Amino acid sequence: MTDERIRLVTMPKWGLSMTTGEITDWWVTEGEEVTEGADLADIDTDKIAGPLEAEGPGTLRRIVVGKGSRAPVGAVLAVQAPAEVPDSEIDTVVAEAQQRNAELAEAVESGAEDTGPAAQTVTVGRRALSYLSVGEAGSDGVATVLVHGYGGDKDSWLFLQPDLGSDRLVHALDLPGHGASSKDVGNGSVDELAGALLGFLDEVGAARAHLVGHSLGGAVAATAAVSAPERVASLTLLAPVGLGEAIDADYLRSFATASSKREVKPLLGRLLADPSAVTRSMVDDVVRFKRLDGVQAALQRLCEAMLDGDRQAVALPDSLAQLDVPVTVVWGAQDTIVPNPGDDVLHARLPRARIELLDGAGHMPHMEKAGSVLASLRG
Amino acid sequence: MSATPERLLESYRIMRTIRDFEERVHKEFATGEIPGFVHLYAGEEASAAGVCANLDDRDAIASTHRGHGHCIAKGVDPVAMMAEIYGRATGACRGKGGSMHIADLDKGMLGANGIVGGGPPLVCGRALGSKLQGTGGVAVAFFGDGASNQGTTLESMNLATVWELPAIFVAENNGYAEATSSTWSVACDDIADRAGGFGMPGVVVDGFDYFAVHEAAGEAVARARDGGGPTLIEVKFTRYFGHFEGDQQTYRGGEVNEARENLDCLKRFRERVTSAGELRGEQLDAVDREVADLVERAVQEAKAAPTPTADDLLTDVYVSY
Amino acid sequence: MARTITMREAINEALSQEMGRDERVIVMGEDNAGGAGSPGDADAWGGVLGVTKGLYHRYPGRVLDTPISESAFIGAAIGAATSGMRPVAELMFIDFMGVCFDQIFNQAAKFRYMFGGKAVTPATIRTMYGGGFRAAAQHSQSLYPIFTHIPGLKVVTPSTPYDAKGLLVTAIRDDDPVIFCEHKALYDITGDVPEDLYTIPLGEAEVVREGGDVTIVTLGRMVHTVLEAAEQLASAGVAADVIDLRTTSPLDEDTILESVEGTGRVVVVDEATPRCGIAADIASLVASKAFGSLQAPVELVTAPHTPVPFSDVLEDLYVPDAQRVVNAAKAVTSWSR
């Protein structure tokens, strides 16, 4: 860069699977003064939307990638520079940027970008279970297994799994009825799913594992831990089902029956502290999942098993309190789907657990506050 | 090939019902109460009755614009038919089909058809379904001398042989396609001659003779059920009324009076079964009375029945939309 | 699990998996096996463009070659549908509808209504349409508006491999007759398609891009042309909503009107000729139901009212391109009284 007064605004990388992002809106116009930390634009990634903040001050001289356009990670989106930098110099920078953007786009198009590890499948009983593994086993050989919640899948860990996998082996599986796994959920009970999880540990050769479960997956991980404590090195529960009584039964039922984007989008908004972070592709992915043969029936079955009227039907066993492994509970402060039952309940049910409350997170702390959850998992 | 007295009496009842039904529609149409186009089957009863006497619930037929007789012979309720002809909500098609589209799929009646030559392709499909499902069912396409010149009919006969379908093609040659003589419009001597070109047997039968039709159709149905493929049967006769009701029939000669007098299928049937001792005259008379009552009831009920409502206009376009 | 496959493979997979799931599903058409009665391979072709390749040996007796007799075999598919089968018949080129249209529009489309709601006709007719192959006037038309005009028929025009598989599965399972129109230039495009069976409802348009400045309604192959145009428009500061109709019957009016209420400016892009077509239909919809939102006249980008020409120079002029879409979008967004 010839002139250090010129600042390039580039497409950020949010989550390791992100290869491109879409500018859904620009909040500033060309010629406008910008202060450090100001919202420049809204960016829609494959999974989540968010604001792009200015890294420093400077007049926004030129927008390179317009509203509604998609650009690869690293692409120059705009150019900031003080007014005294002449237009001719800006023109040169923009021309170079466009050249570079085109090269990046071509790399993404040709698949030269690393698209990450591919999903694998194991057979547990009569079911095929799909999973994604990242990283390599450490010296203790203990893997981490991520267990998603109701209606989720292995991809819901995308903001965590790549980073967590930098120094350990991390598996994320699709529970029965979800993702690319078999859609047969049996009687839909937590016990049934916990059985599948233990079977999964056998198949991937994990004698012991750090279990991380979210929501229904939290109940599944906890149940597996209670029934086979020797298999569990630690237990991390994100907004788990089975500790309190309150649950957004309407959400569960509506999610089971929703079939169009029109129906799904507002539902997903209820999962997050900031509903506007729901992206088109989040909605697309859920709708695509819901339209697979067998999914509707599987979700209905799970829904029935989770609910007793409008309350939770799942109650984790009291013996959970005696579990002799480190237990961490993480709850989003704005969670309205499975609300935090409160310190009294948590201390009574899990007297030795570390409890973390994350402000600014709803029911999806691992997506909304991935950094905090990651720090918690790293201990 | 001997039929039971019950079967004979039933066939007589069918032919008598068709005749009375059509004579009555002819009369009522003249009063102006029946809307649309009506094409009557009177005179041709032996064809529908003779063919359908060989069929059962596995089997299906497709009919023509002149379809009342085929409907009755395949078991469609004459009361519902009459209501349909009057355009009533109680009709076989709830007043949305009319004379030319009476159907009862549950009875294997794929519909009268307003399109000349519309039925034979559908029959290939029904026959294919029976073949693939292994039901042993056959499908029969009734069509006229007019439709014998339609590409759909000729294509279908070819396809039926190529696919070895349990299909039967019944060409009802009543001498006229509308007002044009089949002696002029059909390029060969007999429609049945065309069978050879499609690799199937073809026979000509006297359409006023129930027994001749029954026997020819019986052979064709047996062959089809047995996997022997399709047959073309040409049934020759004349219709007693015009192409449609209101047709002045100035194109015709004196063949109707001749046929009614000397060839009529009902008269010949009665003579044959009573002289052979298969049925008694009183049995047939009793059927005549019952049929007369039935047709009278059908007309009275149709006239008294409600018409469809505005809501019916938009229903049943799709199963779901 | 999704993988990247072509539209041809997606359609083949939909047929194969549905045949595996439901033995009532049969496939018929000219050369759908290709080689019936010939001395060589009985499964030589798999349809003229290979879409049904492989099904013949996988499902013995259920993939039927036909004589070149569209009336007879399209009619047979319809007749078989009334007997509890779920036939998928291939009308090789949509242009050939002329030789079998009676069976489609007077028979299949009418049964349910004409018979008082008692008929169910679950036939699917797959057919290939569209220009770009230098195939001239009788092999290049986009005739789906004619089918769309007929009450009783449903009409599907997928634009991606994902949509093609899901919409075809839905069409096969649907109890009404469905005309499934495949653009011949899209068979080799690729996209992510789940291995599992899935359905996409008929009558649900897809908003393939959100912008807010102008609504561009399109379908089939033109979706790709419009997306190319939308990218150019974005660089020029015009953000487009792009709506892929996916089915022309049923028509997802709500999605169109919702977008138009936000943008007030509409371009409709269709490869078919303009008279009594989809573009005119959408323009009429918008004019009658979103008049209050409109801030500019509706622009229609269609083929001209001519047959499809043969010469590549002429055909390239005939089929709408991205530049025409860009021009139209700029015209409506810059329009003022």
Image (spheres, rainbow, N blue to C red):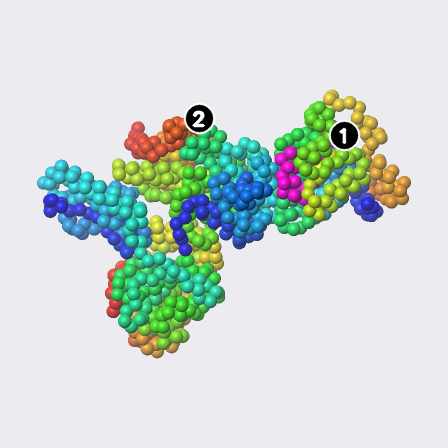
User: Which residue, given by chain and number where applicable, does mark 1 sit on?
Assistant: B238
- The answer, for residue A261, to whether it is visible in the render is no
Task: State the image quarter where residue C267 is shown.
Answer: top left
Discs 2, 1 touching: Cβ within 8 Å: no
Q: Secondary structure at mark 2?
A: loop
List x then y, in percent, for residue B194.
69, 32
Q: In the image, what residue occupies the spot 42% across and 40% down?
A: C186
- Determine the residue positioned at 74% across, 46% down: B222
The residue closer to the viewer here, A37 or C271, is C271
Amino acid tagged 2: Thr
Of residues C312 and C236, the one nearer the viewer is C312
Q: Which chain letter goes with mark 2?
A: C
Q: Is residue B155 magenta?
A: yes
Residue A370 x %, y %: 27, 60
Give the extent of the magenta segment. Answer: B154-176
Q: How many marks?
A: 2
Q: Residue at x 52, y 44 (%)?
A: C44
Q: CA distance from mark 2 to mark 1?
A: 49 Å
Q: Is residue C90 visible?
A: yes
Say which amino acid is labelled 1.
Answer: Thr
Q: Which mark is residue C138?
A: none
- Label 1 neighbourhood size at 10 Å, few (<14), some (14-19), many (20+)? many
Is the C terminus of chain C in the top left, top right, bottom left or bottom right quadrant? top left
Q: Chain of mark 1?
A: B
Which residue corresponds to mark 2?
C306
Instruction: From the viewer's side, name the closer residue of C187 and B282.
Output: C187
Q: Is residue B190 left or right of residue B125?
A: right
Q: Quadrant of residue A216?
A: bottom left
Are the residues flagged by discs 2 and 1 from a single subunit?
A: no
Position of A2 compared to B53: left or right?
left
Query: Looking at the image, which is closer to me, B155 or B255?
Result: B155
Seen in the picture, residue A95 relative to C199 is either above or below; the reply is: above
